[in-house]
Image (cartoon, rainbow, N blue to C red):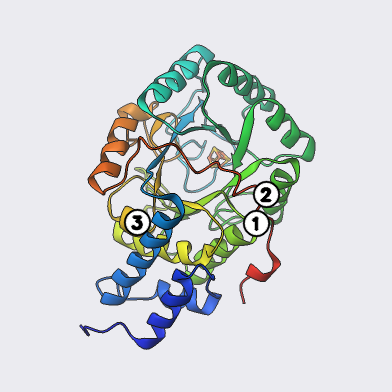
Amino acid sequence: MSWQVTPRISEILKKGGDFQGIDRASALELMHLELHSRETYALMETANRMTREQFGDKGENHLHIGVNIEPCPFNCSFCSLTESAHIFREKVEFPTEKIIGWAKTGEQEGADALNIMTTGTYPFRKLLDLGRHLTAAVSMPLVANTRDVTHKEGEQLLDAGFVGAYHAVRLGEGKDTPFVKKKRVRTITILKDVGLRWMNCVEPVGPEHKAEEIVDLMFLAREYGATYSGIMRRINFRGSLMEPFGMITELEMARMLAVSRLVMGDVPAAHCSHEPHEISLLAGGNLFFPEVGSNPRDGVEQMDAGRGKSILETKQIHREMGMDPLLPSNCFSDRQDRQQPSSHAHPA
Ligand code: SF4
């Protein structure tokens, strides 16, 4: 291994580290760096410095609450909550009181926001009701994680107390899912139009995905000014159609997350890594999703008995990596509101 970072990589890291953004060709070069190389560590150091410069040492924890379980008829191939996975046979809707209880506990334990996830056919009016109940019960920012919405539905989310919505164009959209990429992007524009913050993650990443498709989604996040972006790897539940492809490692996630941080340039986007782990906090990551309720990558009903981590656990990971989860959240400041879709940021 050379002890020098090559001049070409130094140049990309200098530009990226100055918050100028990097072009698609540079992002692809970074995606292909050898994992155990000085270049990869320099990339991660650059991304880590950028995040700490923009967000300080704050470790963000947004509590994911999966509010229902169903054998979902949309059958996305990476999801355990599907008819085709044959894991869940019955529909379950967690009672409102239980969801409010989870939210209150989350608030007491230091969650910075709530991420309210529904499956594909969950009634929209129930999500709105939940928004109103949660707004009355807790004072954390509410983020909806649901299907594509119309302009009117976007406004209804805002009226019900949500400040943002998580909405990803997934890797393999239209192939591994029955949804149309164009419509997913349209929903993102609707969210921005009505004044909701847009939350994103490049997901669900597996070894079969090409660097080009992954990088394109990083640039989408920059183009539309995501409040946060990041990397979620695909977790193959037992019997998943995706099992033969395997899974990427946490170290590979960290390298990708660092590339995403440089791509975002001057967009003040927090960066999530899912599932929560240490190494991505050295690569520009600062945001975790502790979990309760349902989740599309598990075979059990409640995440506190499955793969999900509790807030106390994710806070401890932040502390171990020199972040402070008790600092006030700076993920929902008005810096993001000023960010508009940016034409200059499109992949070259
Ligand atoms: S990802 Fe959502 S829409 Fe797709 S199968 Fe799972 S719950 Fe249904």
Which residue is denoted by mark 3 in the rendering? Answer: 247
Q: Which of marks 3 and 2 is in front?
A: 2
Question: Is disc 2 placed on a helix, strand or loop?
Answer: helix
Estimate the x, y position of residue 212 in percent, counting from the top left: 52, 71
Residue in front for this viewpoint, 300 or 338: 338
Dot 2 or dot 1: first in sequence order is 2
Label 1 near label 2: C-beta < 8 Å? Answer: yes
Would you place residue 152 above or below residue 93 in this image? below
Locate residue 74 relative to residue 243 in the image: left or right.
Answer: right
Residue 283 screen position, x and y as percent: 35, 60
Total number of numbered discs in the rendering:
3
Look at mark 2 in the image and give the residue it sits on: 188
SS at mark 3?
A: loop
Which picture quadrant has residue 194?
A: top right
Residue in the image at 31% along x and 46% along y: 323
Could you tell me which residue is drawn at 39 percent across and 58 percent down? 284
Residue 2 has which mark? none
Residue 87 horizontal side relative to residue 128, left or right: left
Marks 1 and 3 sit apart, C-alpha to C-alpha, by 28 Å
The residue to which callout 1 is attached is 224
Secondary element at image label 1: loop
| Three-letter code for the amino acid on which mark 3 is drawn | Met
Of marks 3 and 2, which one's residue comes earlier in the chain? Answer: 2
Q: Quadrant of the C terminus?
A: bottom right
Q: Which amino acid does label 1 sit on?
A: Tyr
Is the residue marked 2 within 8 Å of ligand 1, measured from its CB?
Answer: no
- Residue occupying the point 26% across, 38% down: 316
Mark 1 CB in 8 Å range of ligand 1? no
186 vs 84, left or right, is: right
Q: What residue type is labelled 2?
A: Ile
Q: Can residue 193 be seen in this view?
A: yes
Q: Position of residue 199 (x, y in %)?
A: 56, 46
